[in-house]
Structure formats: C-alpha cells, structure tokens
C-alpha cells in the first residue's frame, strides 16, 4: 500500500457574474498528482453526510458544481488512485446566488450605449426635418421597376422572407421591406403572395401587410389568403415554394430574409421561370448563391438599410446614420488599438473579451 | 443487382425520385410528393410541439405542478389565436409586440458580442494576434490582410456618402474582399451539397436497387 497526500487549500465560492446555481471549487494539487487517476468532488449540506457530485482528471484545480441557490454547501476533494482515496480538509460553507450585472459584458453595454446615442441623435435631427443622405443601393432602386413589371404583366409578386425566427435581425429587416413592398402592391393593385415557414413570423407579417394596405388607402384590397403559413420544415417549405413559382409564375420574386440551404433551390427555380429576382440576406454562406442566381442581391447590411432607404422614415434613416457613425467608431478603435498593440505591451485585447 | 423488398424503402425511393423529377419540369409525381411532404411535415410539427414544448414546458408545470406564474405566457400565447375572431383580432398585436421586443432585446447583446466585440478583438494588430494564425512569420502578413480587408469592407457598407474619391477606392477593395469570401463560401457549401446528393444516390443505388454495395 502506497500513501498519497490529499489536495490542500480547498476553497469554494459562488461563481461570479452568473445567473446563480453554480459554485466554483478550487484546490491545490496533491503532491502526488502525477500518480493519481484524478479527483473526486464531494458535497454536503450538513458537513456530515457527503455525496459524490463529480470527478475531474489529475492536474486540474477547479470544478464547477451545479447547486440550488440559497442553500449552504460544504465541499471536500478526494485524491484517487484505483480504489484508494484520500480526502482533503472541508471547505468553508458556500451559497450560490445570481448577480444582477455580468461584469464581463460591460463592454457590450458601452457599445450598445454608443450605438444607441448615435441613433437617437440622428433620429432627433431627422424628425426635425434635417435631410439625411443615404447613397443609392442598386437592388432597392429595382424594387419599383420590379413591381411595375408585375403590374404590367398582370402577374403576382412572390415575397419569401426565408426560414428565420423573429429574433433574427434579417427576418426583422425583411418584414420592414415587406411592409413597403405591400404598400406598392396595394397602390398598383398587384397580387402579393407571401408564404411562411414560421408561425410567429407569419402572424407578424400578416399584420404588417394588412397595415400596409390600410396605409396605402386600400384596406379593402387586402386579401387575407395572400399571407399564409405552409409548414415549418425547411425542405417541405422549399418544395412548396418551388411549386408556387412554377404554377403561379410570379413576375418578381423577393427572397429577402434569413435563409439556409433552401436559398439556391428557390433562387434557381425562380430564375428558371424568368422572374426578376431581388434577394437579400446576412447569411454569408447563402449570399454567393443569391449573387449567382438573382438579378439583384442585398448583401448583409444593405438589407438592414433597405427599409430606411425605401420608406425614408426618420426613425429608420436615423438608425442607418447611427450605424454608419458606429462603423466610423469601429474603424477608429481598430486603428488606435492596433497602434497601442504594436507600440506597447498593454493587454489591449482584454478590452474586447 | 439486388432490389430491395422492403416496402418502406420503396416508398422512400419513389418519393425521392418524384422530387428529383422536378429537375425535368413540374409534373403530377412532383406535386404528389410535394403535398405528401408538406402534409407529413405539418403533422409531425403539431405532435412535436405538443409533446416537446406545450406539455412539458407549459401544461404540466402549470396544471399539474401548480407553477401559476406560467399563466402569463399561457395567456400571451392564447392571444395569438384572437386573430381568428374579427371583433378582437386587434389583440394579436399584444403578443406580437411582446415577442418582437423580447427577441430584439435578447439578440442585440449576443450579436454585439459575436459580430462586433469579438471580431474587433480578432482584427486588432498585436503580436498576440499575429501568433493566432499559427503561420510563423506569415502570421503578420495574414493579420495585415485581415485588417485591411475589414476596414475596406466596412467602408463599402458605409451608406452616408457617395462612393467617390478615397471612399470609392477603399469600398472597391472592400467588395473584392467580400467576393473572394463569397467564392470560398460557395465552394465550401457546394461541396457539402454534393455530399448530400451522394448520400441520396447511395440510397437509391444501394438500399433500393442494390446496384452498389
């Protein structure tokens, strides 16, 4: 039988900057660490009956244990070789709790405040009547022509918002553009087809289109069946939209939103029907397919700028100008931080954890 | 050749061939498969949401375990159904507002961290980032290319000025970087799609027709 030394200085503390429910246990390695299988972590609420809550390999000095907030726990660590265990001293009692602020994310709060301040500033000036300039975006200038073409041909417009959820920024941007497209459809009395894959996005889109028809002064022209849910399965949706494209023969296809693998299937089918196609997404892996198969493609942030560009709404214009100012700040930070990083030994990267 | 006698393999294979027939043109076989696909998908979705979300996350905790706080999301969810009753259909805007507000609030901090803070950290020119490329002395070169690419690409997405003069040059370089990135993504994704096609052909030629093993 070989005697082994236990780990020492066992220290348990509430894990900082979290939502509670976790205790961090730290210890000094056993002097015999090299010969060990590892360490077993034991926990007790009364410092009498201990239960094993985890195992961690040798050479490790930290373990995070899931706990119940508001309960005191004692910990001890056992050094383990085969069936032989040697226990450490018991830790002081510890209780997990949730923190109000995650200090690791203060840089995110600062970034949001800076961006938010820019947006508020420009929105304020836009509302005061100051003209805010936004450069021409090719894909957006084509929207009017595309809707006009559909009207002249007496064919419908297909607006496909992708397969994203409401939390996807591309989906939110797409719904803003949908509102503007629906307004023009109402003005020109052009049929709109708007199939959906996500029930909540569908519900929101339906309200947006209905509102757009009302704003255009044509609430009577709104067809409730023009906005509809198909299925929430990606490729079943793609198969159905392909069917719509070849049977309804829309003159214009809008493929704008959050897309995945169905992007090429839809874009290729749309191209084969001879429709004008305007696409847009922020999904880098899907953009190449849209660029190759569609007439116009809104790349990344062009999609976000689109609704502001079309509507000229002060709030949206202010947001775009605010984002532009944010980009200038980012470029400034990149240059300044690089100069500091190259000329000094300051841990500049730690500011961007 | 060893054709399968399993009826499920036959059903699966015929549906696959029906969907592939769309490559020729729209036809009754494709329409049949399309409608089966959509119908089955919806049936599956209803049972999935019932058994995996509604029952374990709402009905059981609320009605069996008495977690009364869940009555709030329950009512918010029910409000989505008011759009079927014309007189109170305006109530649907309440859950829409809550859902959009929640999702935007939840996604903005995550996106700021992932797409701004972390990307900025990876782009800054420091000796630490030079080593991150694991390319020896070439790490410096790659870091500089990345740095120039990021700044030029940002300038392309700057909407407040016409792309003329210096901004015209940087934005032009930026869109070249973007297109090179798209080219790489295109090749990578096509490769993945080809592997999906190979998987389907293996099923048809192997599991169904038994031509390959």
Image (tube, rainbow, N blue to C red):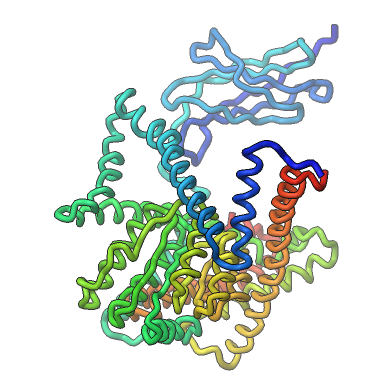
Residue A313 visible from this viewpoint: no
- Between B199 and A328, which is closer to the camera in this rendering? B199
Front position in the image: B68 or A115: B68
x and y percentages locating residue B198 in the rendered image: 74, 54
Residue A78 to residue A106: above or below: above
Rendered residue at 47%/57% (across/down) = A164
Expressed as whole percent of the image width and height from the top left, the position of residue A26 reads 63, 29
User: In the visual, does A5 lie left or right of A43?
Assistant: right
Residue B4, above or below A188? above
Q: Nearer the viewer, residue A205 or A186?
A: A186
Q: Which residue sits at x=74%, y=27%? A: A57
Q: Where's the C terminus of chain A, which quadrant?
A: bottom right
Measured as percent of width and height from the top left, residue B75 is found at 25, 41
**Farthest residue, direction bottom:** B165
Q: From the image, which quarter does the N terminus of chain A lie in?
A: top right
| Residue B30 lies in quadrant | bottom right
Placement of B98 over or under A326, stated as above or below: above
Q: Is residue A138 above or below residue B72?
A: below
Pick the residue in front: B74 or A254.
Answer: A254
Report which quarter residue A251 is drawn in. Answer: bottom left
Q: Is residue A265 left or right of residue A45?
A: right
The number of callouts visible is 0
In x, y percent, where is residue B85? 19, 51
For residue A208, side relative to residue A40 (left or right): left
Residue B9 visible (yes or no):
yes
- Taking the spot 30% from the left edge, 44% from the top edge, the residue there is B77
């Amino acid at each position: 039988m070989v005697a082994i030394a236990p780990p020492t200085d066992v220290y348990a503390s509430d894990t900082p900057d979290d939502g509670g429910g976790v205790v961090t246990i730290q210890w000094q390695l056993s002097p015999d660490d090299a010969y060990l299988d590892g360490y077993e972590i034991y926990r007790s609420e009364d410092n009498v009956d201990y239960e094993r809550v985890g195992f961690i390999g040798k050479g490790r000095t930290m373990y995070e244990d899931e706990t119940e907030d508001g309960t005191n726990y004692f910990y001890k660590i056992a050094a383990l070789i085969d069936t032989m265990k040697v226990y450490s001293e018991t830790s002081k009692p510890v209780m997990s709790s949730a923190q109000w602020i995650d200090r690791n994310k203060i840089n995110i709060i600062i970034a949001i405040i800076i961006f938010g301040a820019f947006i508020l500033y420009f929105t304020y000036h836009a509302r005061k009547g100051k003209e805010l300039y936004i450069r021409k975006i090719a894909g957006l200038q084509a929207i009017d022509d595309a809707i006009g073409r559909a009207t002249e041909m007496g064919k419908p417009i297909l607006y496909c918002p992708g397969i994203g959820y409401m939390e996807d920024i591309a989906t939110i941007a797409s719904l803003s553009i949908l509102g503007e497209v629906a307004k023009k459809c109402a003005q020109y009395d052009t049929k709109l087809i708007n199939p959906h894959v996500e029930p909540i996005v569908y519900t929101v889109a339906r309200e947006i289109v209905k509102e757009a028809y009302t704003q255009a002064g044509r609430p009577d022209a709104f067809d409730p069946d023009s906005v509809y849910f198909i299925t929430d399965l990606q490729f079943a949706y793609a198969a159905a939209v392909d069917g719509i494209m070849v049977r309804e023969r829309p003159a214009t296809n809008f493929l704008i939103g959050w897309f995945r693998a169905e992007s090429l299937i839809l874009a290729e089918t749309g191209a084969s029907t001879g429709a004008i196609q305007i696409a847009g997404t922020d999904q880098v892996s899907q953009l190449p397919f849209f660029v190759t198969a569609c007439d116009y493609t809104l790349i990344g942030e062009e999609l976000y700028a689109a609704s502001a560009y079309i509507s000229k709404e002060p709030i949206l214009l202010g947001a775009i100008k605010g984002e532009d100012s944010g980009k200038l700040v980012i470029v400034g930070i990149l240059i300044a931080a690089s100069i500091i990083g190259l000329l000094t030994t300051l841990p500049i990267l730690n500011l961007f954890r | 050749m060893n054709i399968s006698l399993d009826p499920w393999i036959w059903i699966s294979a015929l549906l696959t061939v029906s969907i592939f027939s769309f490559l020729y043109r729209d036809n009754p076989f494709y329409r049949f498969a399309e409608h089966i696909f959509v119908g089955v998908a919806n049936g599956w979705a209803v049972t999935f949401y019932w058994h995996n979300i509604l029952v374990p996350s709402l009905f059981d905790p609320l009605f069996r375990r008495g977690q009364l706080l869940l009555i709030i999301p329950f009512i918010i969810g029910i409000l989505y159904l008011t759009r079927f009753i014309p007189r109170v259909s305006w109530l649907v805007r309440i859950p829409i507002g809550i859902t959009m507000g929640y999702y935007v609030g939840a996604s903005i901090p995550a996106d700021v961290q992932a797409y701004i803070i972390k990307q900025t950290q990876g782009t800054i020119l420091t000796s630490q980032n030079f080593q991150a490329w694991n390319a020896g002395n070439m790490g410096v070169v790659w870091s500089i290319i990345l740095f120039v690419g990021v700044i030029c690409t940002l300038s392309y997405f700057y909407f407040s000025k016409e792309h003329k003069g210096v901004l015209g040059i940087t934005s032009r370089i930026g869109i070249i970087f973007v297109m090179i990135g798209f080219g790489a993504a295109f090749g990578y994704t096509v490769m993945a799609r080809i592997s999906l096609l190979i998987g389907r052909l293996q099923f048809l030629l192997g599991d169904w027709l038994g031509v390959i093993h």
